[in-house]
Image (cartoon, rainbow, N blue to C red):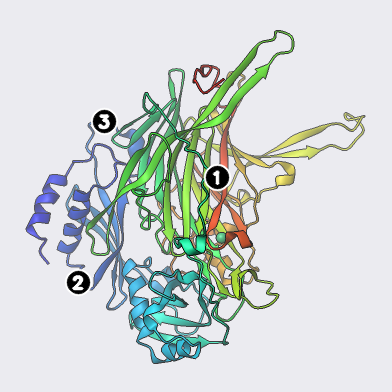
Amino acid sequence: MQPATDDSAQLTATRGAAAHPLARLSADEVHAARALIEGSGLVTPSTRYAYLALEEPTKAEVLAFQPGDPVERRVRAILLDVANGRTHDVLASLTRAEVQRVAEVDTGAGGQAPILLEEFIAVDEIVKADAGWCAAIARRGITDLSLVRPCPLSAGDFGLPGERGRRMLRVLSFVAHRPEDHCWAHPIDGVVAYVDLVERSVVELIDHELLPVPKEEANIDDPSYVGPVRTTLKPLEISQPEGPSFQVADDVVTWENWRFRIGFDPREGLVLQQISFTDGTRERPIIYRASIAEMVVPYADPSPVRFWQNYFDAGEYLLGQQVNSLVLGCDCLGEIHYFDAVMADGEGKPREVSNAVCMHEEDYGVLWKHTDIFTESQETRRQRRLVVSFFTTVGNYDYGFYWYFYLDGTIQLEVKMTGVIFTSSYVADSPWASQVGPELGAPYHQHLYSARLDMMVDGLTNAVDELDAVRVRAGGANPHGNAFTRSVTRLTRESEAARVAHPAAARVWHVVNPQSMNRLGRPVGYALVPQGQPLLLAADEAAIRRRAAFATRHLWVTRYDPAERYAAGDLVNQHPGGDGLPAYAAQDRSIDGEDIVVWHTFGSVHFPRLEDWPVIPVDTCGFTLKPVGFFDRNPTLDVPASTSRHCH
Ligand code: NI
């Protein structure tokens, strides 16, 4: 197939256009990538682009880059032929105008391409064309199929006969009373369809039991349901009369001493690159690349209709792809800078999401304070943070990912979880679900995330120490029994670095640079402070433990390898498991004074409350990175006292 002439022109114009190796793909580059891939003969009318994104150069190439150096721009595409399920993994150089690698994916052993947006629509058509499914719905008293909302739910891998290598989704359904009625209030429980997306058929229908379809409506946008709106809240406005304190140039953000680059990937969403802090005259690197590399939402209900519910919202649903455009909402307050995101749609054409990433500053209360009883001096300084965030909607849930940079060198990630809980018919005294309304249940579940933190604390030679608070037996050096101390254990190999949090011991992990000393001659470091919430709770025998093995440890440390990007492996959709972190760590490389990547699992266990219905007030989870001996003293002594007129 010949590339279209307009695409050829754009391809030529694109060569060498990017100013930095990590610059985000432009719409022109997406056009060029599509033209190049089509020109290779790989694309048929039924080929879809399940993923297309910048293939970042290696860390060594990026670190060696000087402004003005030539930049090779490469893309990776995962092509899915929806007519036959054949899947190709393609690497192409836009700069050289060549397809450099084409590999056909063994979808049985290697997993399926991520779920396409058009497959959301396909499942609706497939189940509604199936006589057995229609009869099962009719048995539940539902006659108007146009109001039934089948959900395209990832199938996982449970060794079910005939499924491996087949492109599957499982379908639970909801029903609306009217087109504008929110369907989540009315789950059609007891029946699930297993769908083959290539054959476009229901291959198995499990009609397990007749359960009542909850009737009570819960429309958060209907005044008759919501009731009178309160009138007591006075306006609260953030005013920055001199503008914000940050600058943005070609996606590079500088704010106070911080500097980093904004990236955006259809799978990971917001990516922060080359995070550094200028300390005096030195620009000191801290993290080379930070992202959410995977997340999984495993459900606890063992019902024959629901035991398979485990959603990898990054690897299966591409959480970046589902990013919200923050045009209409009030997600951020103050002087806001928005970044648009450019991604490829299923046809490989650029799709721009305006206002995808939001950045603003927030006052964050007191930074430090002291009233001296001897000198009578009183000093107070206010904390401020830079917030870089995006919101994504994956089905019923809405997730906000908020990165915070503080004046004192602290970095924090907070995930905001809101939206609508996935509902069920409530079965009396269920040990697996909460009741949130008449006949309405909300199955227990977890939200587990893997942050991939490619650390670079003062350079590439990093190591990780585990520190615990330790009680000391009375006697000897501790005659009065008051002593306690701290143990420090260097994690020297990958096999030693798959660790679990221990909140009762205040366990933290210090990422140190053994070659960079602070003024006291000790290695500089950053502490990863975990929240220590429960890891994957499913039993050892559960299939999800093979597929989400990353979520069985709070910490993994691996040697940097540009090919090791995702905590649950590359193609997660229907992957049988074993890929990702357990496979990376099985190499048992040295991680002591090496170029290392720290992977942190964090999350929450969600036992839904009555107050989580019909929309969840934001719940949060996350982690903190704090400088420990990275600076020679409190780095915020130069913050001036506040002069705000609101300050007295
Ligand atoms: Ni939840």
Give me the disc on residue 44.
2
Q: Residue furthest left?
A: 5
Which quadrant of the structure image shows residue 471?
Answer: top right
The local crowd at label 1, few if under 14, some if 14 to 19, many if 20 or more residues have their Cα within 10 Å, is some
Type of the residue with mark 3: Pro
Identify whether 558 is placed above or below 303: above
Front-lying residue, 526 or 606: 606
Report the side of 456 relative to 536 (left or right).
left
The local crowd at label 2, few if under 14, some if 14 to 19, many if 20 or more residues have their Cα within 10 Å, is few
Q: According to the image, label 1 marks what residue?
A: 590
- Image coordinates for residue 498, horizontal then vertical, percent: 61, 52
User: Label 3, label 2: how many angstroms apart (C-alpha)?
Assistant: 40 Å
Type of the residue with mark 1: Ser
User: Label 2, label 1: how many angstroms apart (C-alpha)?
Assistant: 46 Å
At x 64%, y 50%, the residue is 499
Front-lying residue, 432 or 365: 365
Give me the disc on residue 67.
3
Element under label 1? loop
The quarter of the picture showing ligand 1: bottom right
Name which of mark 2 and mark 1 comes first in the sequence: 2
- Image coordinates for residue 548, horizontal then vertical, percent: 54, 62
Front-lying residue, 159 or 332: 332
Report the side of 458 relative to 197 (left or right).
right
- Image coordinates for residue 578, horizontal then vertical, percent: 52, 65
Marks 2 and 3: in contact by CB < 8 Å?
no
- Image coordinates for residue 617, horizontal then vertical, percent: 55, 54
Q: In which quadrant will I find the C terminus?
A: top right
Type of the residue with mark 2: Thr
User: Label 1, label 3: how many angstroms apart (C-alpha)?
Assistant: 34 Å
Is residue 400 visible in the rendered structure shown here? yes
Indicate if the residue with disc 1 has its beta carbon within 8 Å of ligand 1: no
